[in-house]
Amino acid sequence: MSSRVWIVCLLVSPLSCGQKTGEVPDSGAPPPDATTALPGGGGMDPNPTITFAQVAKAVGIDRSNEPASANIFTSAGTIAYGGWLADLDGDGWLDYYGVNHAQLPHLSGLFVNNGAGGFGKNLFTVSLQPSQVNPPSMDISNEMKFVGDLTGDGRVDLYFTGWSGEGVMCANQGVVHGSDWTGPGYRCFGTSDALDFADVNGDGRIDVLGFDVPSFDVYATYYSHTASYFWRLNNGDPNVNNWPTTQRFLDLRVTNPFSPTPPFVDLDGDGIPDKIVGIPVPDDGRRGPYKTLTAGKQVYLGQASGSYVMKSATGLEAIMAPISHIEDVNDDGCLDIGTDDTGYRDNQSWYIQNKTGTKCNVTFTATPRTALPYYPGFKRYNVDIDNSGLLSKVVLIHSGYGHNDGQPTGVSIYRKLPDGSYTVLRPAQNGIQITGTESSEFYADNLSPGDWNDDGLVDLAGTGSGTMAGTDMGHGLWTSGLVTTNGWIKISLPTVTGFFTGTATIEVFAPGAVGDATRQITAPRTLATGRAWASLGYHLGIGTWPSVDVRVTFPDGHRFVRAGVARGARITIQ
Ligand SMILES: [Ca+2]
Ligand SMILES: [Ca+2]
Ligand SMILES: [Ca+2]
Ligand SMILES: [Ca+2]
């Protein structure tokens, strides 16, 4: 980390760290080169050059480069099923985890960032060790469900899902020293798949929505959503099987609006969980070619009195396809419903939630993909791709089932403009090539944003076709080559770590405008337990402002303001 200098600001002595709260620095006026006005009153580069280069194999993402103690490498059975950036060893640099579809020895990848533009050897085989109690089925763990701190020690844990309803939770043991390697060590436990991760009982510990594995049924669990689900309530034990469970969902509250699932979703925004249930049909042909269809969907709204009340005329009554995504896909503050006949690999069909005034009213209108503000495709990521402070959409578009409306296969970047519209960069322009020599996408592709080389430009890890050039059979790392006059800052909050109740918020304002919601430079960043830890650096684009004012609200309500944070600054606030 010698190349990076962080300025430490202490909560107890704000005057030791920059200007006094409320002071208006000389740099308050928008810089002269800004020709595009932003909502915050500043400017942004109107013509950034956005390109990415595939560097994965060149910087060391190569699973065959293992310590000798991992024994003989074999790549038989390789299917890249996700690439993730996360600081696994806690040194502040983003590391790389590549999931294989069946995590047998050698097939997945765990690479520690060396802080000098590359990654070390593949530690997957030596790092992830099975627990003797509740041993995992690593051969059927095949997809990442959650990357975060499930044990409250500030270290990044991993939760995988597999076939047959099974899941694997790997608890980070901290840095361990093997015979010929040093790196993060993981102990892995077998458990059920998980549908949601959030602190639902308000004790500051992140909980997990699971179900009973012996009675697992794929149709009931994933398509009709009529399975017997329960929340595992975190008690701090690294073995998730030792957490107490509850099925009294109406005693719980929806605290994380970002990972809803039909059995536990707050559609009307009152914090009380609602649910969407499909009407099951027998497996006699009525479930359709993918065995996913139901006879329609019913919506139940949770009441403060502790019961569910069915809502009629929601617009979902005749929807037969399974709900595969619940997201606010059009960014209007109300959750929308995405369905996919295949269950998991096609571009979704969308039912947009309507509003009465500003309130989400739990009725839905079928809306063509092409009628949305950007083309939503298969998966969407909010990324400040150009450091403008605006969140652009990086979209994976699938063509395998013909529901791509003429859009090109692969990654399109919809760059957000100050007026709320988007301008699109297609795969041939942005340099993100995920199809290799295939004619169509590989359906398990993914992206994971993060600044792996710490140059202030957001990069993308991920996977695509096994024939992608410059990769170890589909494990990709696209490094940003952004050229722009926009700038950035990075904020570190080392005390916002472990288990905590409430949330922390980072807000960035125009100079002298702290607290003025109309003069925010970028969307506030809200941090919840399990999704925030000491070594995370929060990257924030600031457009062409020479400096900005930063306000942090800590979980206990304390606020800290640092005025005059210069572009390119790295600030630690504690
Ligand atoms: Ca690291
Ligand atoms: Ca509700
Ligand atoms: Ca919406
Ligand atoms: Ca970068």
Image (cartoon, rainbow, N blue to C red):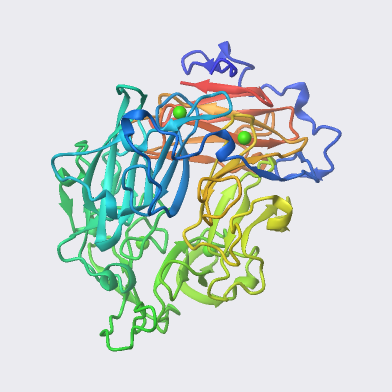
Tell me where residue 111 appears, x and y as whole percent: 45, 34
* Occupied quadrant, residue 305: bottom left
* Occupied quadrant, residue 189: top left
Q: Nearer the viewer, residue 25 or 521?
A: 521
Q: Is residue 298 visible?
A: yes
Q: Is residue 126 left or right of residue 211?
A: right
* Up/down of 444 relative to 340, above or below: above
Query: Dividing the image into four equal quarters, which quarter contains ligand 2?
Result: bottom left
Q: Is residue 482 left or right of residue 79?
A: right
Q: Residue at x 26, y 47 (%)?
A: 201
Q: Nearer the viewer, residue 194 or 270?
A: 194
Tell me where residue 82 appears, x and y as whole percent: 45, 50
Tell me where residue 185 appears, x and y as whole percent: 31, 30
Q: Residue furthest top?
A: 16
Q: Residue at x 36, y 37 (%)?
A: 124
Q: Is residue 233 visible?
A: no
Q: Residue at x 50, y 56 (%)?
A: 445
Q: Nearer the viewer, residue 547 or 29?
A: 547
Tell me where residue 306 appears, x and y as whole percent: 22, 62
Q: Residue furthest front?
A: 72
Q: Is residue 227 left or right of residue 392?
A: left
